Image (spheres, grey):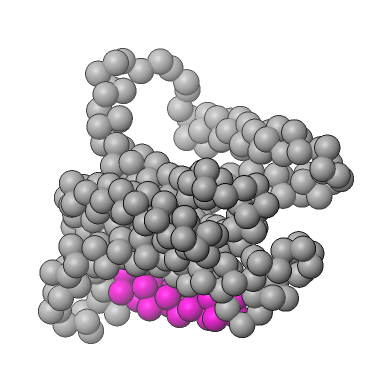
């Protein structure tokens, strides 16, 4: 997993640095998707070389039967990522249908900051997943205890970040954009704590539910969340514009967090002698 973490950091670093170097004005917008692709192409090529050099594994075509097994086993993880993407893109699309590009820009500017903060957890949670998958099978109580510690530390860090974003939203918007994005300040304040809920959703859903046989419940929560999101987004965006879109996002993220927590409450109520595992 350390290689995956390094490769993810490499891809995103290449993209970020290249943006500052090559994108100079509005007409350079087409360079952005090129740079995005280039970063992952480099990381992907490097990963193939690492697989061959470090693990002595050569490329070969897989059978259709093997591919079906992989698709079946990873379906729920794919579905979770798909729903997260739909939450992000559907809100912007709905807001665009009901308003105009300027209003979408106000909302999108704040949401990009929120998404960037949410991505800070990705390398850690990605590396955590296979470890928890194994530990939950061989020692469930110990795994839950470790996850409780991770939740406590992670929630505290994200709560601090969210509070800072809430209090310094105006300064952040002015620093990253300009005075023409004053309307984005309130949006950023409303969604300031969404990165915290996304972190908890990852722990409750991806780390616990998917690793304890609750794939159907996991998928159901996300599916219902997606339906609620579309319904609320249309109504709230129609009456309250981009502010309503932000409120819709917060409500849905809280629903998903609560739904997943309720689903795993038995695991978190396990009574064990913690001294045996510290």
Residue range in magenta is 147-165
Front residue (pair 266, 114): 114
Q: Residue at x 16, y 82 (%)?
A: 273
Question: In the shown orientation, is residue 29 left or right of residue 107?
Answer: right
The spot of residue 86 in percent (x, y) is 43, 44
Which secondary structure type mostly characterizes the magenta part of the structure? helix
The spot of residue 213 in percent (x, y) is 17, 50
Question: Relative to residue 180, is residue 9 depicted above or below?
Answer: above
The spot of residue 174 in percent (x, y) is 76, 70
Q: Looking at the rendering, which quadrant does residue 201 occupy?
A: bottom left
Q: Residue at x 40, y 15 (%)?
A: 61
Front residue (pair 140, 90): 90
Front residue (pair 50, 177): 177
Does the magenta run of residues contain 137? no
Question: In the shown orientation, is residue 23 left or right of residue 89?
Answer: right
Query: Residue 100, can we see it?
Result: yes
């Amino acid at each position: 997993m350390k290689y995956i973490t390094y490769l993810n950091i490499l891809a995103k670093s290449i993209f970020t640095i290249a943006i500052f170097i090559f994108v100079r004005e509005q007409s350079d917008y087409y360079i952005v998707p090129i740079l995005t692709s280039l970063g992952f192409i480099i990381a992907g090529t490097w990963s193939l070389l690492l697989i061959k050099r470090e693990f002595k594994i050569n490329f070969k075509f897989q059978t259709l039967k093997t591919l079906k097994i992989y698709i079946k086993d990873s379906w729920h993880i794919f579905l979770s990522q798909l729903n997260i993407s739909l939450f992000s893109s559907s809100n912007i699309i709905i807001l665009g249908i009901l308003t105009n590009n300027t209003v979408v820009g106000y909302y999108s500017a704040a949401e990009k900051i929120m998404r960037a903060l949410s991505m800070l957890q990705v390398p850690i949670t990605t590396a955590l997943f296979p470890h928890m998958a194994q530990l939950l099978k061989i020692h469930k109580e110990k795994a839950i205890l470790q996850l409780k510690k991770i939740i406590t530390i992670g929630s505290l860090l994200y709560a601090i970040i969210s509070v800072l974003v809430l209090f310094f939203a105006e300064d952040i918007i002015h620093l990253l954009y300009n005075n023409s994005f004053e309307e984005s300040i309130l949006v950023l304040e409303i969604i300031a704590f969404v990165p915290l809920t996304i972190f908890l959703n990852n722990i409750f859903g991806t780390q616990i539910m998917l690793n304890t046989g609750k794939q159907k419940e996991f998928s159901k929560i996300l599916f219902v969340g997606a339906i609620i999101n579309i319904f609320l987004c249309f109504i709230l965006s129609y009456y309250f514009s981009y502010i309503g879109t932000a409120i819709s996002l917060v409500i849905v993220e809280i629903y998903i967090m609560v739904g997943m927590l309720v689903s795993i409450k038995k695991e978190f109520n396990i009574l064990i002698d913690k001294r045996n595992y510290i």
